[in-house]
Amino acid sequence: MTTQELLDQIRHKRSFLCVGLDVDLRKIPGHLLEEEDPIFAFNKAIIDATHHVAVAYKPNIAFYEAYGIKGWEALRKTIDYLNKNHPDIFTIADAKRGDIGNTSAMYARAFFEDLGFDSVTVAPYMGKDSVEPFLEFEDKHTILLALTSNQGAFDFQTKDSEGRELYKRVLETSREWKNSKNLMYVAGATKAEYLTDIRKIIPDSFLLVPGVGAQGGSLEDVCKYGMTKDIGLLVNSARGIIYASNGKDFASAAREEAEKLQAGMNAIMRQNI
Amino acid sequence: MTTQELLDQIRHKRSFLCVGLDVDLRKIPGHLLEEEDPIFAFNKAIIDATHHVAVAYKPNIAFYEAYGIKGWEALRKTIDYLNKNHPDIFTIADAKRGDIGNTSAMYARAFFEDLGFDSVTVAPYMGKDSVEPFLEFEDKHTILLALTSNQGAFDFQTKDSEGRELYKRVLETSREWKNSKNLMYVAGATKAEYLTDIRKIIPDSFLLVPGVGAQGGSLEDVCKYGMTKDIGLLVNSARGIIYASNGKDFASAAREEAEKLQAGMNAIMRQNI
């Protein structure tokens, strides 16, 4: 998917909502456990209930990997269902991969070609040659971790003995890499005030913003500090939507929460764009 | 596996060789492609040919993930084969994972409990709360990326605007984390001269050292700068062993290369220990 197509969808839906499909079998409604593939059954119901207001879906791969081969089967069914029924929706494999060059190329093929995701999250620790293999793919996007939403972000990403902070060096350095037009960045909503500094370095890049909702980040702050004239944001919510209810009404409860977030986004877009 | 058991094995085998099981179907002998599970058939033959001189096996998970569900099945068969036939051998899931706390916990369960690996490699970028869930597991080991063997290591790991380098901060900071006794570290053989500085910070921890062989690192240099009185090293070789031949003699060629490395290790152990 091109960035322009993503942007068109955002304008059309008046939404920049990404729904995180972080499926934990201990948290989904009990009646689904009787299904042949409870994870896929859950995802399908969530997608059916929210696709009119979601512009992206982001399965966190850990949740699938934890269930072994059954988990991977559920992931494949989920991405196939999205690509078949909602080809206009942006898909993110939240995998946080990154390895030496020839190995990163294997990961890139796995997520972009074999599974058919539009994008994948990648960790920057191993540098340029660990990320460039992902950037080679036309109309695929590499979402680099810059400033994450967790407490541990303060251990290495922001601290520096003196001078510049690591997340800023990641932003600056990665802009020089080959095919860097295919880069987006993770910037956590729990650190919204940092977005001003981030925008000074990457004024136009799309940001994937986790941490709104369960982790405590505010949609208003994220937009205030991070929004560009072309939106430039994908705001992720997972637990707040998919576990809004753990009864038989889970899908309609998820729809309600997603629609609430979209309404907030629509209001902000009206004011700013 | 306890660290003591790993050490006993090293002393018994006079070897600290880790064999990297990075299986690429484009590189394995053609006749294996007729097998029902070519990846497992290849791994089994390599293990059968090298287990007398290898103290650890390290499948890089990317190579399995790239083949989707078939890849995961081959990975499971490989680890099951190792755990059943060679329970004394240390196993490393080279996954380079790391995510926010509850998600890292999912990865930890996947590799330690579901698959049954002794250890997993983890990226430090997201800090303490992304690594501690791995450290909770008794007698399991978390191998944190410190200084990797690739060129991109110089992008963020070693550079610092001023003052300390990032890989040193990772070493220092991680020592303070809960259950840090379960930490080992990745330190690339292509940067052997750095091992002196690394040993100043972590004098006793085990180091997993990739980059000997195909990537150009020298066994002698690694031992000169990195060896402790309890060895403290696992030196990985993948391509140099497993692709020593791509004919029907691939297993005996792998044995020969592994034995050569072990002979070098034995000689060094004789001199130093």
Image (cartoon, coloured by chain):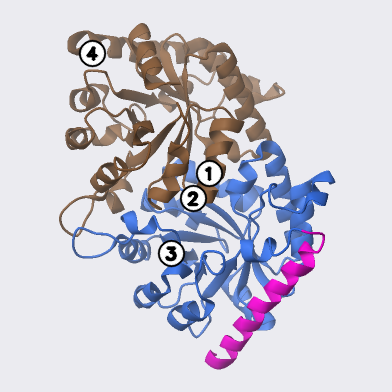
Chain colours: A brown, B blue
User: Tag 2: Cα neighbours inside 10 Å, few (<14), some, or many (≥20)?
Assistant: many
Query: What amino acid is at disc 4?
Result: Ile
Single out the residue that lies furthest toward the bottom: B271
Q: Which label was assigned to residue A268?
A: 4
In-image side of A203 versus A250 (left or right):
left
Q: Chain of mark 3?
A: B
Q: Which label was assigned to residue A153?
A: none
Front tag of 4 and 3: 4
**Element on which disc 2 rests:** helix
Front tag of 4 and 1: 1
Which residue position holds label 2? A101
Q: Residue at x 64, y 20 (%)?
A: A31
**Element on which disc 4 rests:** helix
Q: Position of residue B120 (x, y in %)?
A: 55, 56
Q: Quadrant of the C terminus of chain A?
A: top left
Q: Are marks 1 and 3 on the same chain?
A: no
Is B268 part of what is drawn in magenta?
yes
Is A78 part of what is drawn in magenta?
no
Marks 1,3: beta carbons within 8 A: no
Query: What amino acid is at disc 2?
Result: Gly
Q: Main secondary structure of the magenta part?
A: helix
Q: Is residue B202 visible?
A: no
Q: Quadrant of residue A258?
A: top left
Q: Position of residue A1 (x, y in %)?
A: 45, 21
The magenta segment: B247-273
Q: Residue at x 31, y 24 (%)?
A: A233
In-image side of A139 versus A109 (left or right):
left
